[in-house]
Image (cartoon, grey):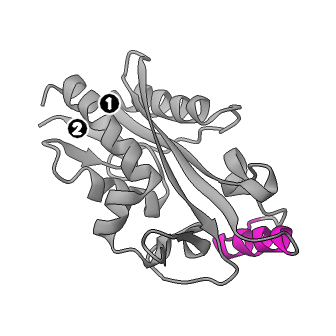
Amino acid sequence: MQKLLIATGNRGKVKEFQSLLAGLDVELVTPADIGLEIEVEEDGLTYVENAGKKAVAYSKASGLFSLADDSGLEVDALGGAPGLHSARYSPLPKATDADRRAYMLKNLSGKPRPWTAHFHATVAIGEPDGQVLFADGNCYGEIIPDERGGNGFGYDPIFFIPEMNLTMAQLSMDEKNRLSHRALAVKAALPLLQKLLGI
């Protein structure tokens, strides 16, 4: 069976990818599974650059096809911030997800609501020869000032999806696998993966 490396050390993302790719006839492996320790500096100016850089680095280091992503939350009232810098948004050293959410709400304080926003994800499929393919997904909603739900990570507890009347962190895994930016990007990437892996 073909192996596909999930190119991230983020446990929340690994769990999502494993769930999203569960129906694929492929053996999913993580860097920890194969003893791979690699740090890729996300210094690109776009989601495509960052996702591609990770996918290629992991693929070359492992000799396996790899799946990486770069994603961010873009808040209209903040001029599209934090965007590419979503994971590094708080000025605090070693900031937690809760620190980043608190910092965002502080920056939104006093701005008129609704605080419309969207999550964007770019998925990159890396090949050991350095080739890379991309797919994108977006999920639209708004930021709310109170945290709700315990199923997500990052900004999920304050990202409200009006059509569901729930935050991203209140969605079941099935709902998230249908609606999330990462789910939509993976869905768009599936035909590319199947063709590449011959499955």
Query: 42 and 82: which one is in front?
Result: 82
Q: Do the residues labelled 2 and 1 touch (CB within 8 Å)?
A: yes
The quadrant in which the N terminus is found is top left
Disc 2 secondary structure class: strand
Q: Earlier in the sequence, mark 2 or mark 1?
A: 2
Q: Name the residue rendered at 43%, 77% in the picture.
A: 151
20 left or right of 130?
left
* Three-letter residue code for mark 2: Lys
Q: Residue 91 carries which label?
A: none
42 left or right of 5?
right
81 left or right of 141?
right
- The residue carrying mark 1 is 65
Query: 198 and 147: which one is in front?
Result: 147
The Cα–Cα distance between marks 2 and 1, rounded to whole angstroms, is 7 Å
Q: Name the residue rendered at 20%, 24% in the picture.
A: 195
Disc 2 crowd rating (10 Å Cα; few below 14, some 14-19, many 20+) is some
Disc 1 crowd rating (10 Å Cα; few below 14, some 14-19, many 20+) is many
Query: 19 and 1: which one is in front?
Result: 19
Magenta region includes residue 97: yes
| The magenta segment | 94-109
Disc 1 secondary structure class: strand
The quadrant in which the C terminus is found is top left
- The residue carrying mark 2 is 3
Above or below, 17 relative to 39: below
